[in-house]
């Protein structure tokens, strides 16, 4: 079998096409991984923001309870369901 210049060029062209396709597939996989990582980052960032907001609320509550005696009384009465003479206690149950 005689190998001609044309055959070599065809084989080289086919090899180039295969290499090009492999690069495209690799790039697509990389983009999927980047998109997946970006989604995970955004979820983690959202979770951190929610946690920080909860922390701020707890810090505000702690500050209020450490500086405001009326807030302490309200909290104790709420948690222990304590009422003053003449008051009525109304319990509300939340149903999901």
Image: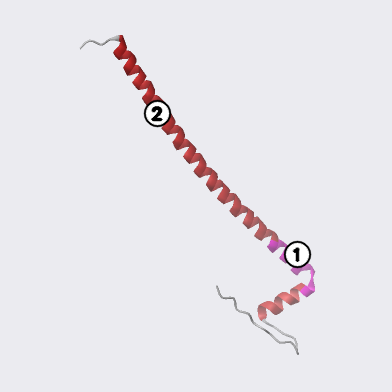
What residue do we see at 60% from left, 50% from top? 45
Would you call the spot at circle 2 few (<14 residues within 10 Å), some (14-19), or many (20 or more)? few
- Compared to residue 60, the image places residue 72 above or below, namely below
> Where is mark 2, residue-wise?
21
Magenta region, residue range: 57-70
Mark found first going from the N terminus, 2 or 1: 2
Q: Nearer the viewer, residue 62 or 85?
A: 85
Q: Within the image, what quadrant is residue 74 found in?
A: bottom right
Horizontal and vertical percent for residue 81? 67, 82
Across and down, in percent, residue 95 comes to 56, 75
Q: Which mark is residue 63?
A: 1
Residue 58 sits in quarter:
bottom right
Taking the magenta stretch, the answer to whether it contains residue 64 is: yes
Secondary element at tag 1: helix
Tag 2, which secondary structure? helix
Left or right of 54: which side holds 36?
A: left
Q: CA distance from mark 2 to mark 1?
A: 62 Å
Residue ID at (35%, 17%): 12
Q: Is residue 36 left or right of residue 90?
A: left
Mark 2 or 1: the one toward you = 2
């Amino acid at each position: 079998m005689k190998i001609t210049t044309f055959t070599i060029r065809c084989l080289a062209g086919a090899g180039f096409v295969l290499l090009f396709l492999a690069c495209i597939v690799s790039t697509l996989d990389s983009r999927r991984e980047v998109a997946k990582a970006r989604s995970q980052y955004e979820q983690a960032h959202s979770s951190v923001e929610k946690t920080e907001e909860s922390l701020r609320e707890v810090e505000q509550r702690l500050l209020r309870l450490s500086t405001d005696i009326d807030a302490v009384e309200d909290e104790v009465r709420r948690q222990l369901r304590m009422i003053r003479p003449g008051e009525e206690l109304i319990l509300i149950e939340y149903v999901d």
